[in-house]
Amino acid sequence: MKNIEKVLLVLILIAAGVLRFVGTNPGYNKYHSDEGISYSAAVSMIKNHNLDPLRYDYPAVTPLVNYLFFRTVFIPIAWEKYYISHLGEIVDGKVKLPLDDETYKRVFQIEILGDREVNAIFWGRYTTALLSLGSVWLVFILGKKLYGKWVGFLAAIFLAVNFRSVTNAHIGLPDTYNAFFLLLSLVLDARLFSKSEKQDYLIAGAGVGLSMAVKYQFFGVFPFLLAHFMWSRESLKEKILNTKLWLALAAGVMVFVSINPYALTKLEETLAWLSLINIKYAMGRKIINVYAISYLYHIAIGSVAFGFMMIGLGLGAIKKWRETLFLLGFVGPFGYMTLYYSNGGFYVRNFVTAMPLLMIWAGVGFVFLLNLMRPRLLKIGFLITGLVVVLWPSVRNSVVNSYYYTKPWSYETILVDAEEMLVEGDIVVAHPFDPLPGYVTRLPFVAEERYSLAEFREEGANYALINMDWAANNFYGWMNTTFRESLKYWEKPYGVMRNTYWGISIEEMMSCVVADAYKPWQAPEAALFLVKVPDYSELDFEKIEVTDLVNFSVEEDYVYKIVARILSDQPVEKNMRSAYVRVDLYKNKTQAEGNVLGEQVSVSPRYWGEGGRDEEIYVHVGKGIGYAKLQFDYSRLVDAKHQIGKVVVYRSTEEFSRDEQCGAVNYVEYKDLLYPYSHGNL
C-alpha cells in the first residue's frame, strides 16, 4: 500500500509539473510590470554584487530565490552552452580564455542574459514553476498531517490542476512564492503538534519570518501562535512565559531583518512604496467584495469544488476543530483583508496564496461525502464521478492555459500581419507601446479622446490597433461596486457592459477586425486586433425623409449616414467629451419598440467644442435588419447640459458590399477578452 501511495504522489507531481513547466516559454509576454521583482531584481543583484533588490514594494525573498537559482543553476548552464557553441572560435584563438573584463561583460549581457534580459525572464519563470510544484508536495504533507492521507492526496490533486495556481506558475510574480513559503511555514508549525523542543520552535519561528518576507503579510504568525497555545499542555501563564515561544518569535524577526536589510536602511523609500500600495489596495475600504467571492466560485476554484470546500470547512470545525482553527489562523485574517478591509480581492492573483489551504478543505468535504457512500460500488461511482466533476473545469482551463502559452507572443504575431497589410501613409490609432511598422503615422489611443470607429474616422485614421489591456479598462467597474449594488453582479454582467458607450464602440470595432493576435481568456496575454476604419467617402448619398427617428425602416446592405447636431450649454474639452448619438438596428419593429440592445449598434463621435456641432454616424445595415432607432446618450456624467438638435438621414444610392471594407465578426468570438473575468484576465 505504501508503494501505491508513493506512485500516486509521483503521478500527481508529474501532472502538476507538466501543467506548470509547459507554457513557461514563451508564456506571458515580457512586459508585466510586477515580474521585474523576480528576475530583474535578481539580475541587478548579480551585476551590482550586492543583495539590494532596488525596489521595496515587496520584501526580498522572491528576488533572493531567483538570485540563488540564477547563480547556481541557470548562469553556469548558460556559460557551458556559450563555450560549447564557440568551441571552434576558442580553438582558433578568436575567443581568448579567460575573457577580459570588457568581453566578459558584453557576452554576459548579450548572450547569457539575452536581449533585454529575456533569458533571465524565462529563468525566473522556471523557478516560479518549480516552487509552484513544491506547493503541491507541501499541501500533501500538510493535508495528511491535519486530516489524514486521503485528504492530503485530494488536496494535492486539486491544487495540481487548479487553474489559478497553474496560471500564476507561468509568470514570475511573488504570489506563487508566497504560497510556497506559507505552506512551508505551516508544515513547520504543524511539527509543534507533537514536537516541542527548542530547535523545533526556532525552525518554526524562522519559517514564519521567511513567509512574512515575501509580501509584507503578517498573517503567518497566527497559525504559529495557535499551534503553540492549542497543543501545549502547559497552563496559559506558562504558555505565555515560555522561553521557546519568545525565542521563536525573535528568530522570525531576525530572519525577516536579515533578508531585508536594504529595505530597513532605506526606510523612507520603503515607506513611500508601502504608502503607494495602501492607496492602490484602498486600505480601510471596509466593503464586502462580492466580486472576489464570485470569482473564487466561478473561476478560481469552481462551483462544485467550492461546495466541497464549504462542507469541509464546516465539518472540520466540528470534527477537527483545532486543525481547522489552525488553518483559519491564516485564512481568516487573509480573507478579512482581501475580501473586506482592502480592495485586494480585485487583484485575484492574491488568492494563489490561500488556494492550497482551500484545497485541503475541499479534500475534507470530498472524503466526508465519500465515506457516507454505501455499498462499495456506490462509493467507487461517487469517487470517479466526483473527481471528474470537480477536476474537469480546472483541468480544461489549465490545459488551455499551458497549451496556448507555448504559442508565440501576440506582439510578434500582430507585427508580421501589420507589416503585410499597412502601407506608408496609413494613419493608425494605437497605444504607444504596441507594435507597428515604422513607416505608418501613429495616433495615440486615448480612450477619453478617441475610442470609437467614428472618432478614429473623425481624425483621419484608416486603421486602429486595439490592445485589450487598455481598451477593456472601462469594463472593470462592476468588480468594485459597493456591497448592495454588487449582489446583482454575482454573474459577470455582460448585458450591462455591452449596453454602454464603451461596449457599443468596442463591438462595432470588432466587426471590422482584419488581423488579430490573441489567446483564449484562460491564457491571458496581449490581445491585439488590427481594425479597419470603414471608408464611405466615395459613396453617393441621397437624403431620405424619416418621420419617426426612434423607429424607422432601413434596407439591408445599404449604408446610412445620420448627421445629428449636438448642442451644449458650455464649452467641453476634448478629453471631457461624453454626449453622443447611437443608432440601434433590429430585425423587426417589435424589437425596435422594446428597450433592448440592437443587433448592430453604431455610435457618433462624442461631442466636444463650444455651442453646437454636427456629428456623423455611418451605419452599414447587415443581413436581416429592417428597423433602426436613434438615441441620445452619455459615456459618463458631465457638468455640461447637452441636447440633440436637427437630425438628417441619408442613404447610399446603391447597395454596398461589407467585404469591401471588413469582415463581419460576431462579438461572441471575443466576448471574454472584451469583457474580462478579472483584471487583464490574470
Image: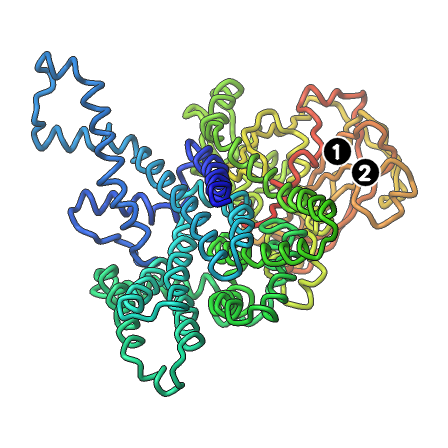
Residue 532 seen anywhere in this rendered image of the structure? yes
Q: Amino acid at mark 1?
A: Val
Disc sitting over residue 619 in the figure: 1
Residue 614 seen anywhere in this rendered image of the structure? no
Q: Is residue 257 left or right of residue 338?
A: left
Q: Is residue 473 above or below residue 17?
A: below
Circles 1 and 2: CB atoms closer than 8 Å: yes
* Residue occupying the point 40% across, 79% down: 233
* Residue occupying the point 43% across, 46% down: 132
Outermost bottom residue: 237
In terms of depth relative to the viewer, which is nearer, 236 or 101?
236
Q: Please, what secondary structure does the residue beneath circle 1 have?
A: strand
Q: Amino acid at mark 2?
A: Leu
Q: What's the image's color scheme?
A: rainbow
* Of callouts 1 and 2, the N-terminal one: 2
**Quadrant in the rendering for residue 472:** top right
Determine which residue is flagged by label 2: 585
Q: Is residue 496 left or right of residue 464?
A: right
In terms of depth relative to the viewer, which is nearer, 45 or 136?
136
**Quadrant in the rendering for residue 290:** bottom right
